């Protein structure tokens, strides 16, 4: 099948969770999931040693790679400016680039979204719409419980 979704680093960081795997594995098995290369750097930041870095990077091989382009950078800057115009700052650069890559390819963007005191959810966004695929319980990942 054709690539239809890009996974955000919020998904990549939680691949070992059974609830995430239940949603991601079928799509990955069909070859529908890709990742933006910028996410590889973000995942590598959490490695405590070279062995762990190699394992983390190896786990990403199930996703096709979408390289960051100049057009993605330009779109990320446009979105960052639009957010600044609305006094909404603080969006991480990798998140802007992943979203720009998904938008450029007309793919859905899979991410796990958290709000304080709320459970994690897996969303698929396309054309500005969002729908919940599956609620995820992650009390250990909830910033309010740290």
Image: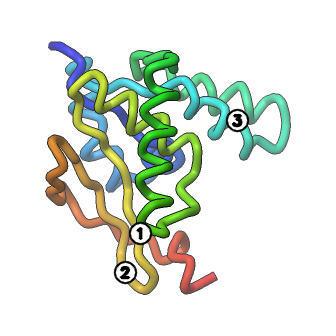
Residue placed furthest toward the front:
85
Residue drawn at (47%, 77%) of the image? 139
Q: Residues within 10 Å of mark 3 (few under 14, many from 20)?
A: some
Q: Quadrant of the N terminus?
A: top left
What x and y, as percent, mark residue 58? Answer: 59, 23
What x and y, as percent, mark residue 49? Answer: 85, 37
> Badges 2 and 1: C-beta atoms under 8 Å apart?
yes
Q: Is residue 120 above or below residue 45?
A: below
Residue drawn at (21%, 59%) of the image? 134
Q: Specify the color scheme.
A: rainbow
For mark 3, what is the residue?
Answer: 44
Q: Quadrant of the C terminus?
A: bottom right
SS for dot 2: loop
Residue drawn at (58%, 29%) of the image? 38
* CA–CA distance in space, label 2 to label 1: 6 Å
Residue nearest the viewer, comparing 73 with 129:
73
Q: Indicate the quadrant where residue 120 lies.
A: bottom left
* CA–CA distance in space, label 3 to label 2: 27 Å
Q: Is residue 81 above or below residue 84?
A: above
Q: Is residue 130 above or below residue 1?
A: below
Residue nearest the viewer, comparing 82 with 28:
82
For mark 2, what is the residue?
Answer: 118
* CA–CA distance in space, label 3 to label 1: 22 Å
Q: Which mark is residue 144?
A: none
Residue drawn at (79%, 30%) of the image? 51
Compare marks 3 and 2 and give the one earlier in the sequence. Answer: 3
Q: Which mark is residue 114?
A: 1
């Amino acid at each position: 099948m054709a690539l239809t979704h890009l996974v955000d680093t919020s998904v990549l960081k939680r691949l070992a969770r059974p609830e995430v795997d239940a949603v991601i594995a079928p799509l990955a098995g069909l070859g529908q999931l890709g990742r933006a290369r910028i996410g590889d750097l973000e995942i590598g930041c959490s490695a405590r040693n070279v062995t762990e870095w190699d394992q983390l990077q190896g786990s990403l091989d199930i996703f096709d790679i979408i390289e960051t382009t100049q057009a993605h950078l330009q779109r990320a800057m446009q979105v960052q400016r639009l957010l600044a115009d609305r006094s909404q700052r603080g969006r991480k650069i990798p998140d802007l680039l992943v979203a720009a890559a998904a938008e450029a390819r007309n793919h859905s963007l899979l991410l796990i979204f958290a709000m304080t005191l709320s459970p994690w959810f897996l969303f698929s966004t396309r054309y500005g719409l969002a729908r919940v695929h599956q609620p995820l319980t992650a009390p250990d990942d909830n910033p309010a419980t740290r």
